[in-house]
Amino acid sequence: MTTLTLERSDNLYILELINGDNDNALNLDVLEEWFAALSEVENHSGNTALLIHSEHEKTFSTGIDLKWLMTQPQTTIAEFVTKLENLLLRIATLNCPTVAVINGNCYAGGALIASACDFRYMRKDKGRFCFPEVKIEMAFTPVMLEIVKLLPSQNALYELSITADAWGGDQCQHTGIVHQALPLEQLYPTALTKAQQLSNKHRPTITTHKQVLREKVTALAKQRGLI
């Protein structure tokens, strides 16, 4: 893998995004690396959890690699959109808890990945959480909208989706978009502790609860044969 790494520490899997110089942007090759990592976690037989973070202190992910996408034929673009939807559905219905560490800018597809996770921790003083689709004139697909609707604050997600404003950590915590906003030195240790605690919980029960509580995305994932 060239854009991410996956390591296991006791019961916990840690997925690190390592393509920060390219904003951890998403293209077909990157999606395939995500799929391989998720398959390893899915196939682990014991209790576990997944922690997702970026090695770059200012960037989580800015989403789709637009420069790459704009050079592709329509068939490739359609394939990419379907696979991006599949990635989001797989994260949202993963058979273990997921924790996102938003240590920097989290835009578009990156914000969708964070939205698909179960828990979000964000850097307090740097970085922004943003759905810029209104500004770049690229509407969410129906699947992406269901992922956005997983965020706990309906008023906040509506405002973010309609305005395309970029919110900092304090505002995201105040509106419930993230569970906690912290200084950089506290961010990863706090999220890691949460993920370690979750990694010891009874996995089959968690999986059942996730699938019932996330009924619509679960149905979409089942329709596509993802679970």
Image (cartoon, rainbow, N blue to C red):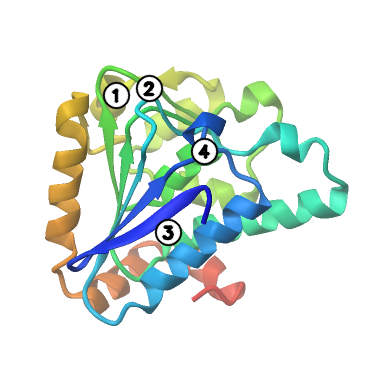
Of mark 1 and mark 2, the one earlier in the sequence is 2
Whole-percent x and y of residue 191? 20, 44
Inter-mark Cα distance, 3 to 1: 22 Å
Q: Which mark is residue 92?
A: 3
In space, the residues marked 2 and 3 are separated at their CA atoms by 23 Å
Q: Earlier in the sequence, mark 4 or mark 2?
A: 4
Secondary structure category for the residue under label 1 = helix
Which mark, residue 24? 4
Q: Amino acid at mark 2?
A: Gly
Relative to 36, is 202 above or below? below
Task: Kindly identify the amino acid type of the residue bearing the numbered disc 3.
Answer: Ala
Say which mark, if any, is on residue 169: 1
Q: CA distance from mark 3 to mark 4?
A: 19 Å
User: Is tag 2's residue or tag 3's residue first in the polypeptide sequence?
Assistant: 3
Mark 3 or mark 4, whichever is nearer to me:
4
Which residue reaches farthest bottom?
45
Q: CA distance from mark 1 to mark 2?
A: 7 Å
- Give the mark nearest the N terminus, 1 or 4: 4
Please name the residue that numbered disc 2 is placed on. 127
Position in image of residue 86 (x %, y %): 58, 61
